[in-house]
Image (cartoon, rainbow, N blue to C red):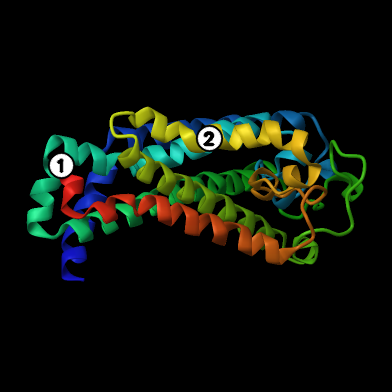
Amino acid sequence: MRNLATVFPLLVHRLVKRTEFRVAVTVSLVFVLAAFAESCQHFYGSDIGDLPSPAYAWAWNMDAMQINSMRVYLYFFMPILSALVFSGSAKEDIRSGVASCIVVRSSVKSYLISNIVITYCGGFLLVLFTLALLQLLAFIAFPVNGLYGGYMDTPIYLDVMPNDGLLYDLRIDSPYIYNMIFAVWSSAWGGLCSLFSFGLSFLLRKHKTVALVIPTLVSLALFQLSPLVSSSVYQLLHFSYCYPNIDRQLNDPFFFVVYPAVITALSLLVASVPLFKGKDVLL
């Protein structure tokens, strides 16, 4: 425990100094601004009585609000940016010899465990920051007392609003809590993609970029191929569970909880690869 207390603050300090961390934050902010601009543009010139509340106008509610920049973020950039924050740091430290200097003051195990924790938290917090900022910006452009679904509670671009679905009651009674549940769920996915990239960086050795993009490539491959196999398999993909998408989600809160639990176990297994190598991981 003492070793963890020694190395953890040092690695956190290294995180905020990394160029990759700054790039990930900057690109995330670009997506936030683009999504906010799209939200405002959709309602340009509308009467205030026709505006939805910030709960509905949250840009991460991308289907109803038709926010294309957030679709690009979810499908292509979210896993990569999450992993970019810190997943490659340990491998870089080992190659440069910095890891050996840190291990002398702690241990290989505490060094790797600290990297695993910070890698997950870095990816998680980056996505959470992005989505929470989108919600805060919605309060700037839309009236708090606006109707949840806009004029006459009708979605702006969808003809029919489902009257049931995953967490439907919470969506009606506490829409901001409902939004934050999806924000946390998406953030957890970002953290798990970071862990996958962390473990893959030790398996693939010199191919750092490949480790960063594999989670995204695998997700996109499943997205493209699963409809050819079964529509049921397609509906089980994580994309439709990352954001409010009540007309496509299974009405099963149990699945909503178990899904990330299973992926967490798999990601921790991959991220534990360097732990199995012991001191050899420094070679």
Q: Which residue is mark 2?
A: 216
Horizontally, residue 17 falls left or right of residue 3, namely right
Whether 60 is drawn above or below 164: the answer is above
Q: Mark 1 or mark 2, which is nearer the start of the sequence?
A: 2
Q: Which mark is residue 44?
A: none
Residue 119 spot, x, y in % from top left: 36, 49
Give the class, few, some or many, for how many residues have Cα within 10 Å of label 2's Cα (few <14, many ≥20).
Answer: some
Image quarter where the C terminus lies is top left
Instruction: Kindly identify the amino acid type of the residue bearing the numbered disc 1.
Output: Leu
Instruction: Kindly identify the amino acid type of the residue bearing the numbered disc 2.
Output: Thr
The residue sitting at 47% across, 45% down in the picture is 193
The residue sitting at 77% across, 59% down in the picture is 166
Closer to the eye: label 2 or 1: 1
Horizontally, residue 102 falls left or right of residue 153, namely left
Whether 278 is drawn above or below 258: the answer is above
Residue 278 spot, x, y in % from top left: 20, 55
| Residues tagged 2 and 1 counted as in contact (Cβ below 8 A) | no
Number of numbered labels in the structure image: 2
Quick one: SS at disc 2?
A: helix
Residue 32 showing in the rendered view:
no
The residue sitting at 75% across, 38% down in the picture is 229
The residue sitting at 71% across, 37% down in the picture is 226
